[in-house]
């Protein structure tokens, strides 16, 4: 296994999954080890490590899949399991799953007995390039995304891009959205590389290089500002509107994947970037061309705008009752802490509907 990134968490690239995981357990765990999965990663990923002597019925926890389960009931189940199966302060929780259980498991570990170590083994493209690194952990609450959580870094992250092979196209596209976001906040060259990647026929060996670059971009911002006081807000580009779309869709009982919501959200936010700081319109149309072709359109009515606005009032970047956007002046030129009037936000939603 090689070290991909050295930050608060050491990020490793896997060579031999079972051996690498055994090595990490020996290195980072000082007590009893626990393994958290959801029903999807249990089905598709557990077989790859099954038979390892470290895991048995007494230390494997499985929660239901889907973001609707990133909630207090599921985390309570994890706390209960740890509590009734002899976990102590020296225990380690291993999250073998996508971003949902990595977020929830990280938060469970951060709070159990005031904090135990955890290791992330991200099994989805989205969790490899984004959710497993950077230390944001948490759960959804009262219909708001990640409303409850803490910053707590995994002791280690083990990335094995081969896990992506069993993902369906929709989930691969979801992860690709965060790679588009990383490219847009980083530079023109990265944008062109990501834009030209054929995500619908994703080639895993090509993806390996892109994943490493995307992790480097994420870590670049995390290292500069671990608790999102300033420049880390760049990583939230697309999420002010995107999280509103995601929460809205969940409430309506027609959930959209996180990456889809972010992809849709980037379009109105690029429009705001054009209005507030001059992001070039021709480049907006280039990004729209990619996003519409991969993700299609998010359907909503003008009558829904007030609900979106209300959801945006819960964005974690907000201060002094103002909705706080991360906007772009150009690709790679970020403007954090931008506020926009309600009228302009509605205009951006109109723009999204029109393109
Ligand atoms: N903490 C962060 O910085 C951060 C960053 C981005 C997103 N997130 C969060 O991550 C979540 C989205 O992550 P996600 O897209 O990985 O979703 P997810 O964890 O829900 O996984 C998506 C689906 O894929 C299944 N799955 C997992 N691994 C698989 C595999 N190898 N093959 C086949 N199926 C597999 C899961 O069971 C699930 O049904 C959201 O909750 C989002 O808010 C967090
Ligand atoms: O790491 C970050 O910082 C991000 O904002 C990454 C986002 O892709 C991710 O969805 C994150 O969970 C959003 O955080 P939130 O603070 O807006 O809930
Ligand atoms: Zn995200």
Image (spheres, rainbow, N blue to C red):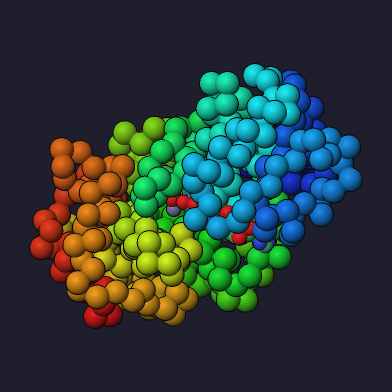
Tell me the quarter of the image containing the N terminus. Answer: top right
Observer-nearest residue: 191 or 150? 150
Tell me the quarter of the image containing the C terminus. Answer: bottom left
- Looking at the image, can residue 154 be seen? no
**Quadrant in the picture for residue 88:** top right
Q: Residue at x 72, y 39 (%)?
A: 35
The image position of residue 347, as x and y in percent, is 15, 69
Q: Residue at x 57, y 66 (%)?
A: 171
**Quadrant in the picture for residue 183:** bottom left
**Is residue 80 placed above or below 196 in the rendered structure?**
above
Observer-nearest residue: 303 or 92? 303
Q: Is residue 224 left or right of residue 9?
A: left
Q: Is residue 38 left or right of residue 30?
A: left
- Count of marks, rendered view: 0
Q: Residue at x 71, y 65 (%)?
A: 166
**Is residue 255 placed above or below 221 in the rendered structure?**
below
Ligand 1 picture quarter:
bottom right
The image position of residue 226, as x and y in percent, is 42, 33
- Looking at the image, can residue 307 be seen? yes
**Is residue 139 placed above or below 304 in the rendered structure?**
above
The image position of residue 79, as x and y in percent, is 60, 33
């Amino acid at each position: 296994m090689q070290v991909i990134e050295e930050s608060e968490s050491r990020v490793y690239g896997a060579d031999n999954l079972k051996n690498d995981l055994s090595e990490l357990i020996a290195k980072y765990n000082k007590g009893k080890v626990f393994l958290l999965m959801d029903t999807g990663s249990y089905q598709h990923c557990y077989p790859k490590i099954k038979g390892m002597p470290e895991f048995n019925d007494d230390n494997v926890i499985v929660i239901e899949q889907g973001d609707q389960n990133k909630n207090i009931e599921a985390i309570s189940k994890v706390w209960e399991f740890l509590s009734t199966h002899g976990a102590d302060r020296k225990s380690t929780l291993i999250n073998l799953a996508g971003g949902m259980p990595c977020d929830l498991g990280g938060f469970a570990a951060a709070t159990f007995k005031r904090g135990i170590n955890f290791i992330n083994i991200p099994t989805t493209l989205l969790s490899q390039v984004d959710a497993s690194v950077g230390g944001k952990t948490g759960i959804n609450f009262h219909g708001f995304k990640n409303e409850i959580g803490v910053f707590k870094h995994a002791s280690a992250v083990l990335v094995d891009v081969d896990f992506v092979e069993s993902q369906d196209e929709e989930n691969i596209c979801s992860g690709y959205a965060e790679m588009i976001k990383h490219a847009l906040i980083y530079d023109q060259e990265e944008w062109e590389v990501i834009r030209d990647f054929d995500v619908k026929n994703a080639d895993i060996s090509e993806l390996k290089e892109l994943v490493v670059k995307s992790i480097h971009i994420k870590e670049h911002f995390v290292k500069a500002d671990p608790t999102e006081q300033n420049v880390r807000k760049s990583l939230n580009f697309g999420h002010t509107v995107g999280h509103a779309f995601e929460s809205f869709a969940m409430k309506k009982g027609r959930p959209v994947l996180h990456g889809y919501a972010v992809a849709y959200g980037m379009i109105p936010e690029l429009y705001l970037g054009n209005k507030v700081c001059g992001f070039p319109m021709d480049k907006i149309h280039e990004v729209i061309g990619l996003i519409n072709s991969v993700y299609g359109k998010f359907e909503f009515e003008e009558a829904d705008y007030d609900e979106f606005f209300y959801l945006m009032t819960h964005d974690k970047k907000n201060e002094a009752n103002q909705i706080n956007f991360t906007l772009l002046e150009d690709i790679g030129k970020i403007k954090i802490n931008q506020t926009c009037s309600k009228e302009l936000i509605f205009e951006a939603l109109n723009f999204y509907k029109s393109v």
